[in-house]
Amino acid sequence: MKQLLTIPVILAAVLWGWKHIDESGLRAASGSLSAAELGALAATVNPGEVVMYSITECPYCAQAKGWLNQNGFAFTECNMSLESSCESEFNSYGGNGTPYLVAQRNGKAHHMKDGFDSNEFPRAAARSNIVSKQ
């Protein structure tokens, strides 16, 4: 009987988790910006102001790139599988997982150390046009 109750509890937990992940597989949060607002924000981000450290085998990197491209954000990918200088830069930041994004402008940077978050990134980009450092 205990085993019969365990299965519905596990299924409910999986369904709850699935419901709280957006369609791109990235962490979503309530209060996210509309597509128009994201597009307007993306227009303020210049090439070279966002660097994504990635590895070729990383599915989360592919999802983050897809989200950034879909929403029109300019970014530079630094693939550590292809360029050793990227790995050196990544290590200098104390990175321990990918994707690792650094958004910088006016000499200040915001480091997304816990992976890409589709809610955190626009907040970081909007906050003084990418000028805070965690």
Image: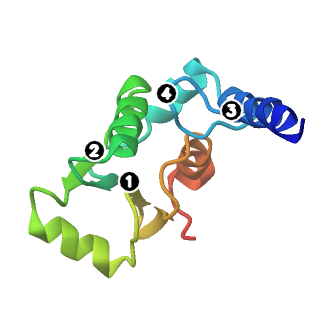
Q: Which residue is mark 2?
A: 47
Colour approach in the figure = rainbow
Please state which amino acid type lies under the numbered disc 4: Ser
Q: Give residue 125's position: percent from left, percent from top.
A: 53, 48
Whether residue 57 is situated above or below residue 43 in the rendered picture: below
Single out the residue that lies furthest toward the top: 36
Find numbered disc 2 in the image and state the secondary structure of the residue it sits on.
loop
Q: Residue at x 42, y 64 (%)?
A: 106
Residue 24 circle label: 4
Q: Is residue 114 left or right of residue 82?
A: right
**Which corner quadrant holds the N terminus?**
top right
Please state which amino acid type lies under the numbered disc 3: Ser
* Lower position in the chain sequence, tag 1 or tag 4: 4
Please state which amino acid type lies under the numbered disc 2: Pro
Residue 99 circle label: 1
Find numbered disc 1 in the image and state the secondary structure of the residue it sits on.
loop
Find numbered disc 4 in the image and state the secondary structure of the residue it sits on.
loop
Q: Which residue is mark 3?
A: 32
